[in-house]
Amino acid sequence: MIISGGVNIYPAEIEGEMINHPKIADIAVFGVPHVDWGEEIKAVVQPEAGVEPSDELTEEIMAFARERLAKFKLPKSVDYVAELPRDPNGKLYKRTLRDPYWQGRSNI
């Protein structure tokens, strides 16, 4: 769960909508530190094969998300990875993705 400005936000709901974008192969959504709000929403996307990360892709993905999610549930930023870390059973290692953003900070 992400707590942003005192509001509980569930990453699974955001992931469930955004994974429907045709250029997203896999996605992870989690909270990253924000000075004023506690946490803000970060999306880490694994693009479909042959799709290159770009500012244009980010805008396309965000436009897609704006049509499906409330404004307070929209990711504030999108990062790209070649492949999301998963165990052999398919479980996402979300902490592996999240931890670098929190290094040097105590969890809120």
Image (spheres, rainbow, N blue to C red):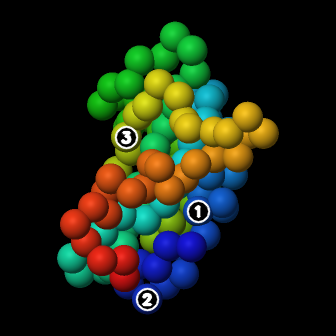
In the rendered structure, which amino acid carries the disc numbered 3? Asp
Kind of residue at badge 1: Pro
Local crowd size for mark 2, using a 10 Å CA cut-off: few (<14), some (14–19), many (≥20): few
Mark 1 sits on what residue?
11
Figure quadrant of residue 26: top right
Residue that protrudes farthest toward the top in the picture:
50
Name which of mark 2 and mark 1 comes first in the sequence.
2
* Quadrant where the image shows the C terminus: bottom left
Residue 70 coordinates in the image, percent (x, y):
54, 67
Instruction: Classify residue 24 as left or right of residue 99.
Output: right
What residue sits right under mark 3 in the picture?
79
Between 41 and 65, the residue placed more toward the observer is 41
Q: In percent of the image, x 41 and y 34: which residue is there?
A: 80
Asked if the residue at tag 2 contacts the one at tag 3, i.e. Cβ–Cβ closer than 8 Å, the answer is: no
Give residue 75's position: percent from left, percent from top.
43, 56
Q: Residue furthest right?
A: 89
Looking at the image, can residue 84 be seen? Answer: yes
At 52% from the left edge and 11% from the top edge, which residue is drawn? 50
Mark 2 to mark 1: distance in Å? 15 Å
Of the numbered discs in the image, which one, if any, rests on residue 58? none
